Image: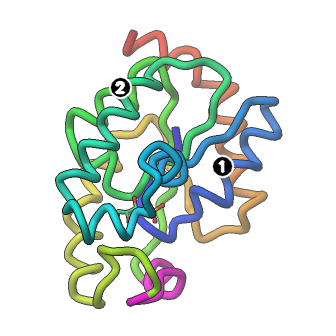
């Protein structure tokens, strides 16, 4: 389970991790768009953020504990306690830790992400969510090249994954 802020590279690194492990890869945002038939932006605009968070929770509960799957969680999913609990159950969780400057470079304001609507908002969300992300099993510096980030996650999963999953049940 890959978690971290918008722009931390979860969707880029995820397929590399999945390929190395021989697992499937799914992106939660894409998955929710397929289930609802609406883009993430439209869900936010037409139904509100609460509806999107409910979709995230429902999906997290459905996929919890599924084996041989690498999932990129949306940037807000791991900050919601119930969704975080579901995403952590039976899974090894990796936090792609990007610094604010990297995030601001990678996430264009007004670039289609409904919550990336201005530097101040991004900065506030970024600060607010760090404690949640730090609850992940493993942290990796996401400013590095995607291949290097993926390699670190794969190594950590092989070394610590089973124990982390067992510890949580
Ligand atoms: C969100 C991040 C997005 C997407 C939605 C809300 C957030 O996912 O789930 O726009 O609350 O940070 P990415 O982290 O994949 O951009």
Decide: is 45 above or below 89.
Answer: below
- Which of the two residues, 95 or 1, is positioned nearer the viewer here? 1
Mark 1, Cα crowd under 10 Å, few <14 / some 14-19 / many 20+, is many
* Residue to which mark 1 is pinned: 14
Which image quarter: residue 26? top right
Residue 78 placement (x, y as % from top left): 33, 45
Secondary element at tag 2:
helix
Image point (49%, 25%), residue name: 91
Q: Nearer the viewer, mark 2 or mark 1?
A: 2
The question of residue 75 being in magenta is answered with no
**SS majority, magenta:** helix
Mark 2, Cα crowd under 10 Å, few <14 / some 14-19 / many 20+, is some
Quarter of the figure that contains the C terminus:
top left
Say whether residue 109 is left or right of residue 127.
right
- Span of residues in magenta: 101-110
Residue 12 placement (x, y as % from top left): 67, 60
Image point (44%, 74%), residue name: 99
Decide: is 111 above or below 18.
Answer: below
- Which of the two residues, 167 or 126, is positioned nearer the viewer here? 126
Image point (66%, 49%), residue name: 14
Image point (47%, 60%), residue name: 97
Q: Quadrant of ligand 1?
A: bottom left
The question of residue 106 being in magenta is answered with yes
Residue 163 placement (x, y as % from top left): 53, 15
* Residue to which mark 2 is pinned: 61
Marks 2 and 1, the one that precedes in the sequence = 1
Which of the numbered marks, if any, corresponds to residue 153? none
């Amino acid at each position: 389970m890959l978690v971290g802020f918008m722009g931390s590279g979860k969707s880029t690194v995820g397929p590399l991790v999945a390929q190395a492990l021989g697992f499937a890869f799914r992106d939660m945002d894409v998955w929710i768009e397929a289930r609802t038939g609406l883009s993430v932006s439209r869900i936010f605009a037409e139904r509100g953020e609460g509806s999107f968070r409910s979709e995230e929770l429902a999906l997290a509960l459905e996929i919890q504990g599924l084996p041989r799957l690498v999932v990129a969680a949306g940037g807000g999913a791991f900050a919601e306690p119930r969704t975080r609990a579901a995403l952590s159950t039976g899974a090894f969780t990796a936090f792609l830790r990007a610094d604010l400057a990297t995030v601001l470079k990678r996430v264009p304001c007004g670039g289609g992400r409904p919550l990336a609507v201005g530097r101040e908002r991004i900065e506030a969300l970024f600060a607010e969510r760090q404690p949640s992300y730090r609850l992940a099993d493993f942290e990796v510096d996401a400013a590095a090249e995607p291949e290097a980030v993926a390699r670190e996650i794969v190594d950590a999963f092989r070394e610590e994954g089973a124990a982390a999953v067992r510890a949580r049940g």
